Amino acid sequence: MVLALTHRMLEAARAGQWSTLVDLESGRRREMAEVSDRPPPTPETAVFQRRKADILREILAADQEVAALARARMDELSKALGIIGTRRRLQRAYTTG
């Protein structure tokens, strides 16, 4: 379930659906808390440990891509806000001067 939520988060980020991403992240946090509370299968076999490591690597890779996409979007928004601020300052300068 955590891995599936992670994939859905990545899809949302790629599609620019940021509010969906936030909702999915909240759900994933809850799911991760539940998973961490569960006892591991007894005994943990080497196959289980390898699969768990693979899943964790996949989650980390997806999280890195989501973070990069979010940073890019934040940069876009920051530039847009900068342009708006510049326009307001120019407008004030020309209307009050």
Image: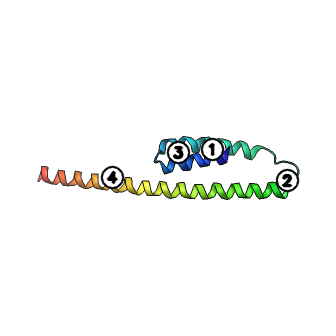
The residue to which callout 2 is attached is 44
Percent x, y of residue 33:
69, 44
Q: Distance between the Cα atoms at labels 3 and 4? A: 22 Å
What x and y, as percent, mark residue 43? 88, 51
State yes or no: discs 3 and 4 in contact (Cβ < 8 Å).
no
Query: Which mark is first along the chain, 3 or 1?
Result: 3
At x 19% / y 55%, what residue is drawn?
90
Callout 1: helix, strand or loop?
A: helix
Name which residue type carries label 2. Glu
For disc 2, the neighbor class at 10 Å (few under 14, some 14 to 19, many from 20) is: few
Precedes in sequence: disc 3 or disc 4: 3
Picture disc at residue 21? 3
Q: Earlier in the sequence, mark 2 or mark 3?
A: 3
Q: Marks 2 and 1, Cα distance to the nearest angstrom?
A: 24 Å
Picture disc at residue 28 = 1
Nearer-N-terminus badge (2/1):
1
Residue toward you, 25 or 93: 25
Bin the neighbour count of mark 1 within 10 Å (Cα to Cα): few under 14, some 14-19, many 20 and up.
some
